Structure formats: C-alpha cells, structure tokens
C-alpha cells in the first residue's frame, strides 16, 4: 500500500503555511516539516494541521535539512514541496498514482515571474488558468520531486540540492511526470527577493569552494552574481565555463550567459562565436538559439537570423511562441508587414496575456489589412 510522505523545509513561513496546508489537504498521508529556526508560528501551525515538526539547526546546507526530514519520514514515497509552491488539485490523482511506482519522477517547476527580462522567461499559455492567474510569464526548471522513500536516496548540494545523483547511483529509474510544481517565490515581495538572493550568493560561493571542479556549481554562482548586478564578477566564472568541455550542459549555458554579457558590452563578434558553440553543443537549448537569433539580428544578418529560427524550430519544436516572437520582430524590422501581421495574430491568440505581443498585434492591425 502506498503511503505518501510530504517532506518540506520551513523557516518563518507562517504567512504561507495555512493556505499551503489547506490547498493540499488529502494529497499526502503524512507531513514531515523541517523547521530550520522559525521565530514565528510556523511550527505551531504545522503541528495543528497534523504535521510532524523536526527542529534542525541551519548549516548553510539545504541538502542536510531535506535529509533530516527524510530520516523521519515513514511512507513508501516522498513528495518534495516548499510552502510557496502548489500542486494543482486536478493533478492530485495522477501524482498519487505515480507515487505507487518504484520510480524517481522528474517534474517541471513553473517559477512564475513578472519580469519578462529574465533570461529564460516564457509567456503563460492558459494550461493552468487558476494557477497562472495574475502572472504573465514564468521560467522553468526540473527536479526529482517524487521518489521512493529509501535510505540510499538522499539529497546532495548546499543549494539547488538534488536527489537525482543518488537515484542514478542506485539505478532507480528516472522518468518525466506531467504534473508540474507551481512556484510563487519570485512574485512575493522585493524584500523576500533580496533575502533569497543574499542567501543564494552565499551558498553558491560555498558550493564552489566545496568543489572547484563542479561546473554546475560555477554556473549557479555566476547566475546569482548576474542577478545581483555583479556582471564583472560573473564574467570570471563564465570565462572558466566557456573554456570547459563543450559537451557539458553547464558549459553550454555558461557560454550563453557570457555571450549575453559580451553582446551588451558591444563585443558582437565574440558573442556570436560563443553562441555558435552553444547551439552546436546543445542544439535543444531554446534560449541559446534565441540569443543567437538576436545577435544575428543585431548585426543585420537577416538571412542568417531567419535560418537560425528555422533550425531552432527543428531542434526545439515548431510550436514555440518565443521563436515566433523572434521571427515576428525580424519580419517587422525587414518590412515584411503582411507576414508579420499573420505571426502576430497567431501569437496573440496562443498567448493572450503577453503584453508585448498584444501591443505589436494592435500596431500591425492599425497599419491596415487587420
């Protein structure tokens, strides 16, 4: 018989816990909540809802805190969530069914953000109307969020901790699960954002110090530095990544971020060379293609830009609104108004909440023919 254990970390989450626990009532069989030093009513609220609270002294290590919860759980499967996350109610049955299998399930995390300037921003498309309400876009990440509760499956990594390496070492099958996690941590407040970024910068630096050869840790550190506006510091990490073996995923993303910096610095030729390597080494990396198209457009290499859009569609999927957006901008800038109007109409229908596209569609419609 399947027993699903929710294992989560909290600290001063009293503002979030009541709604979180009410929303997910009935999803799990037990809740183990690791409290890393709350000064508010988090622990009392969790106990009142029937959760077992595990005090844990914070050690600058998210993996250690999660593992403290796993050690106390008694179910057959573990669900990973935080207090600012949600599973859509319509997905409860599918998640419960998946929990019965001896599989590590890879889930997409939909990180809602109101900042279209985010490097991996995507427009919402109405797949989850209730969860998306009030938010125009998101950026995605993936994690093993549902897995068998076993003593050999434990988290590693001070930050962006993961149980995936342990699952792979134990030969536990890893499969994608079409039940996303909806995350609202990036749309709370400027104060919360600042606290999160300060902690991420500290832990990412410690993670690099733990293992200087960890390419993923260097990418995480560089990303946090960029978010903090410390471009020159980030460039040092990114240059190390850009010189690394091209077949590694963090290296391709490091080249992408360094190319973005170089383009902003007016070093267009360097940016194009880096991006050419990025899309060659990781051809399914959508955002590498988008930056590549923008660099080509900046150089007014329109034929190459349109060809890159076609290549990106072949690698990343024909029905990709972000590629449609790049084609739309290129069509407008090359005076192909009729074709631009068609693309804008399609995009406005597919992504009705995308303000930039709505404005372009309106402008093109007023030019005539629409």
Image (spheres, rainbow, N blue to C red):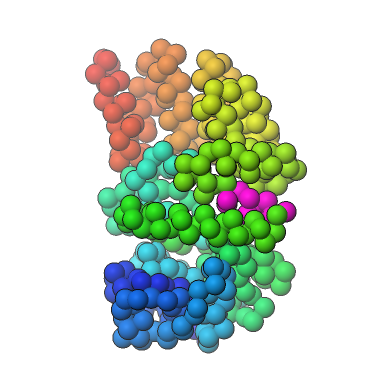
Residue depicted at 57% across the width and 29% down the height: 262
Q: Position of residue 92 (x, y in %)?
A: 40, 70
The stretch drawn in magenta includes residue 123: no
> Is 133 above or below relative to 37?
above
Q: Answer left or right for 14 relative to 195.
A: left
Which residue occupies the foreground of this view, 354 or 151? 151
One can see residue 259 in this view: yes
> Is 265 above or below relative to 146?
above
Residue depicted at 36% across the width and 39% down the height: 350
Q: Answer left or right for 284 relative to 354.
A: right
Residue depicted at 50% across the width and 74% down the height: 58
Name the image quarter holding residue 11.
Answer: bottom left
One can see residue 315 in this view: no
Q: Main secondary structure of the magenta part?
A: helix
> Is 317 above or below relative to 59?
above
Q: Answer left or right for 245 relative to 353.
A: right
Which residue occupies the foreground of this view, 210 or 282? 210
Q: Position of residue 314 (x, y in %)?
A: 59, 34
- Residue found at the very far right of the displayed protein: 245
The magenta span reads 213-221
- Residue found at the very far top of the displayed protein: 335
Which residue occupies the foreground of this view, 210 or 314? 210
Residue depicted at 73% across the width and 42% down the height: 244
The stretch drawn in magenta includes residue 217: yes
Q: Check the picture and name the quadrant holding the C terminus.
A: top left
Q: Position of residue 306 (x, y in %)?
A: 54, 22
- Report the label total: 0
Q: Position of residue 289 (x, y in %)?
A: 57, 33
């Amino acid at each position: 018989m399947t027993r699903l254990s929710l294992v989560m970390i909290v600290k001063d989450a009293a503002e979030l816990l009541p709604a979180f626990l009410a929303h997910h009532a009935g999803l799990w069989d037990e809740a183990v909540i690791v409290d890393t030093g709350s000064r508010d009513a988090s622990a009392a609220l969790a106990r009142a809802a029937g959760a077992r609270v595990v005090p844990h002294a914070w050690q600058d290590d998210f993996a250690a805190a999660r593992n403290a919860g796993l050690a106390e759980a008694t179910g057959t499967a573990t669900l990973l969530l935080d207090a600012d996350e949600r599973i859509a109610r319509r997905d409860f049955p599918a998640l419960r069914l998946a929990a019965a299998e001896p599989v590590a399930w890879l889930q997409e995390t939909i990180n809602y953000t109101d900042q279209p300037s985010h490097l991996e921003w995507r427009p919402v498309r109405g797949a989850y109307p209730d969860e998306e309400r009030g938010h125009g876009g998101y950026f995605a990440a993936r994690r093993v969020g549902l897995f068998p509760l076993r003593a050999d499956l434990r988290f590693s990594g001070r930050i962006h901790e993961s149980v995936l390496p342990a699952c792979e070492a134990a030969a536990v099958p890893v499969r994608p699960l079409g039940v996303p996690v909806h995350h609202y941590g990036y749309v709370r407040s400027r104060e919360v954002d600042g606290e999160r970024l300060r902690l991420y910068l500290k832990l990412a630096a410690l993670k690099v110090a733990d293992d200087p050869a960890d390419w993923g840790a260097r990418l995480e550190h560089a990303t946090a530095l960029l978010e903090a506006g410390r471009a020159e510091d980030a460039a040092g990490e990114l240059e190390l990544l850009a010189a690394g073996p091209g077949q590694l995923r963090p290296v391709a993303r490091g080249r992408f971020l360094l190319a973005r910096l170089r383009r902003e610095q007016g070093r267009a030729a360097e940016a194009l060379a880096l991006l050419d390597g990025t899309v060659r080494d990781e051809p399914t990396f959508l955002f590498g293609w988008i930056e590549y198209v923008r660099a080509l457009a900046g150089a007014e290499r329109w034929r190459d830009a349109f060809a890159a859009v076609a290549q990106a569609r072949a690698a990343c999927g024909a029905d990709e609104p972000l590629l449609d957006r790049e084609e739309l901008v290129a069509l407008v800038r090359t005076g192909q108004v009729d074709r631009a109007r068609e693309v804008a109409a399609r995009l406005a229908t597919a992504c009705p909440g995308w303000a930039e596209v709505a404005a372009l569609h309106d402008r093109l419609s007023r030019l005539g023919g629409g």
